Amino acid sequence: MGTALNRRQFLIRTGAAAGAASALSIPGRAQNPKLARVSVMTSYFGTRMPDTRDKGKPAVTKDLSILDFPEMIADHFHIHNVEVQQMYFPSTERSYFKEFQDRLKKAKSRVSNMPLEFDEQGTPGIVSVCSPDKAIRERAIGLTRQWIDHAALLGSPSVMVNQGPLEAGKTGPAIEGLRAVAAYGKSKNVVVSIENRGPTPPETLVEVIKASGIYANPDIGNFADEETRARGLRLMYPLSHGNSHVKLAPERFDFAKAVNISKELGYQGIYAIEAGRNLAPDPFQAVQIVLDALLKVI
């Protein structure tokens, strides 16, 4: 009992209290305290949710609504942190966000992070606050400010922007754009983060993070090889605001080794599950596979 209480007090001190409190307060359920540090990202569930960017006929029947997501994740996995991508909100009316807030409250859940993707399709990071094209950059800054407002309304502590590819020695526009949205986020008590993507060296990413005053969202899967992964995670976790993406691809990298690096560095934040089709044809099955692996390590 003393150990459990000390752990809860520690979670409160380290900023994970909202997730911990919700996960540990549901009567009649024997909760695994580790679940307080786990979130589920919409990502793969997006194959079953209408995407506001979809211009053509969907390839599959879209039978889920983002309004149902918090309760669905809480009921199925006993997880009360959700990471929601903005393109699955069909409306930005305050009344719609109020309805989503009500659904969060019903599920005793919270939004742990909001990734923002402004491209017309996919996630290439063309429409980005880091774009070298001033017009595109300013458009993305405007969109990001709007979604920071929405994130603040929903109680999300952070938004994650897509910086696209960054090239060493040519990071001026990226730093300028990120500084602008970071300053706006600070005024709303919402931090801005970026994750490691594509071929950008982790050193370049860290340079931009430090220069722009934002935070890192380490993604254990988004590295070219194991050496870069170990180096990059050790650089990024100390710059995290408390959110990290975890995915499973045994053919590409050692999941347990990557998560253990976060523990080695004293990371006490959220592990957000980003499951994919590579694991199972059904999102629930895929998330469960990652969750089982994660709970063995954290």
Image (spheres, rainbow, N blue to C red):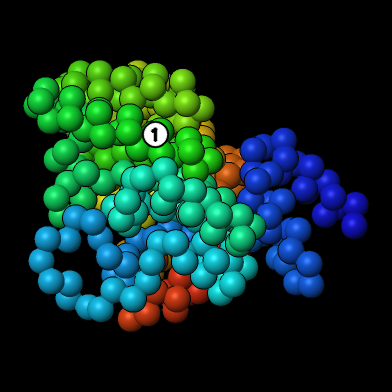
Which residue is more in the foreground, 54 or 241?
A: 54
Query: In this picture, is 11 found above or below 181?
Result: below
What kind of element bears circle 1? helix
Which residue is more in the foreground, 83 or 222?
A: 83
Q: Position of residue 121 (x, y in %)?
A: 15, 54
Image quadrant containing the N terminus:
bottom right
Query: In this picture, is 172 found above or below 69?
Result: above
**Residue for badge 1:** 148
Q: Position of residue 94 (x, y in %)?
A: 41, 43
Q: Which residue of the protein is positioned furthest toward the front in this rendering? A: 95
Disc 1 marks a residue whose amino acid type is: Ile
Q: Please report the residue visible at 55 percent of the width from the left and 54 percent of the height from the top.
A: 102
Q: Position of residue 210 (x, y in %)?
A: 39, 22
Which residue is more in the foreground, 104 or 30?
A: 104
Q: Please report the residue visible at 32 percent of the width from the left and 51 percent of the height from the top.
A: 91
- Tell how many labels: 1
Left of 163 or right of it: where is 273? right
Tell me, yes or no, if residue 27 can be seen here. Answer: yes
Q: Please report the residue visible at 43 percent of the width from the left and 48 percent of the height from the top.
A: 95
Left of 253 or right of it: where is 241? right
Q: Please report the residue visible at 41 percent of the width from the left and 39 percent of the height from the top.
A: 150
Which residue is more in the foreground, 107 or 248?
A: 107
Dot 1 alpha-carbon crowd within 10 angstroms: few under 14, some 14 to 19, many 20 or more: many
Query: In this picture, is 12 found above or below 183?
Result: below
Tell me, yes or no, if residue 296 can be seen here. Answer: no
Q: Position of residue 157 (x, y in %)?
A: 51, 37
Image quadrant containing the C terminus:
bottom right
